[in-house]
Amino acid sequence: MNFVNTEEIIKSAKKILIISHINPDGDALGSTCGLYQAIYNKFKKKADICALTYVSPVYNFLPNMDKAKSSYDTSLVYDLVITVDVAALDRLGEMKILFDKAKTTINIDHHKTNNNFGDYNYVVAEASSTGEVLFNLFKNSDWEIDKDTAECLYTAILTDTGGFRFDNTTEDVFQTCAELVRLGANPNKIFTYCYEQKSKNYVMFQNHCIGKAEFLNNNSIAYTTVYRRDFEKYDAKDDFTEGLAEQLRAIETTDIAFVVKEIEPNKICKISMRSKKYDVSKICSIFGGGGHARAAGCTIKSSVENSVTKIINEIKRIDNEHSGK
Ligand SMILES: [Mn+2]
């Protein structure tokens, strides 16, 4: 896969926009900033980049991150809009209007469910990350990967593989990252930026939530509840709950871990669920949610207490089916 079909389009486009999904993660931002740099190096052309809505300050270290806009002019019509790490168009949020109006669109992604919504599509489901897809596109098209681009792509791959731990951590990932390090990406520096810039409040909030975890079924089910008052106490941002379910899953006896997060008291809760062997996307789909087998989520319109009861009942029901009870 290479840019043979689209190089002329990128070259001739006067106004280019690079966007990713809302609430962008490391892959989304690393890919956005890396592609910006690569297009600049190749064509001496500055694209617009836009990142909505909650953008973690953790990624401020990325080259070109200072150029990312948090708002945009809806009257603009771009010659070319390139989406990176966008599985489906609804993931663009309000930025979809700019995609819809664009003269030409290019879709670069690695989600299996991507339905090739662009005029030109570079979707590689086997790739660990959009950063890895971009790396191969740049290599195969003889585009320069300078130090800044390498740092962006390395960040994308590092974060989407969970720090080289998830099952998408392939030999290709290490080959690619070895080359990115050769090109100037500093693994320790990037790791420190991505994973060791936590605020005191974040760590204390996570400890608080883990500290009140509950355990059921011989500790095979682990869960915790997070109320609005917990958020207020630690001045917690919405993403402070990230990683809580993984911490509970990491306990040796845990089969299923979940976190119930109060969104609106007595009305709406968000649930994130993790497992070691069960397909928790099935449990979440009962409540209108979904996701992957080992990581899924849903929203329940009820109080925290009722949500916990509903989920535990479903887990027990599925557990009984498994054991033939
Ligand atoms: Mn990704």
Image (cartoon, rainbow, N blue to C red):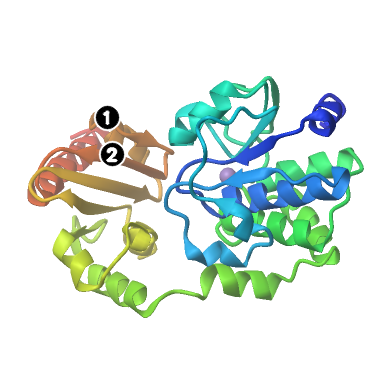
Q: Earlier in the sequence, mark 1 or mark 2?
A: 1
Q: Left or right of 229: which side holds 122?
A: right
Q: Which of the image's four quarters has the N terminus? A: top right
Q: Looking at mark 1, is its residue's CB closer than 8 Å to ligand 1?
A: no
User: Please, what secondary structure does the residue beneath circle 1 have?
Assistant: loop
- Give the answer, above or below, for where 92 lies relative to 58: above
Q: Left or right of 324: which side holds 25?
A: right
Q: Residue at x 65, y 44 (%)?
A: 48
Q: Position of residue 59 (x, y in %)?
A: 56, 63
Mark 1 Cα shell of 10 Å, populated few (<14), some (14-19), many (≥20): few
- Corner quadrant of residue 254: bottom left
Residue closer to the observer: 166 or 288:
288
Mark 2 Cα shell of 10 Å, populated few (<14), some (14-19), many (≥20): many
- Give the answer, above or below, for where 64 lies relative to 325: below
Q: Position of residue 305 (x, y in %)?
A: 8, 51
- Corner quadrant of residue 114: top right
Q: Residue at x 50, y 27 (%)?
A: 97
Q: Position of residue 88 (x, y in %)?
A: 51, 29
Tell whether label 2 touches label 1 (CB within 8 Å).
yes
Residue, disc 1: 288
Q: Residue furthest bottom?
A: 200
* Residue 167 visible in the snapshot: no
User: Please, what secondary structure does the residue beneath circle 2 have?
Assistant: strand
Q: Looking at mark 2, is its residue's CB closer than 8 Å to ligand 1?
A: no
Residue, disc 2: 298
In the image, what residue type sits under mark 2? Cys
* Residue 279 visible in the snapshot: yes
- Give the answer, above or below, for where 174 lies relative to 110: below
Q: Which of the image's four quarters has the C terminus? A: top left
Q: Left or right of 33: which side holds 52?
A: left
In the image, what residue type sits under mark 1? Gly
Q: Where ligand 1 lies, by image quadrant? A: top right
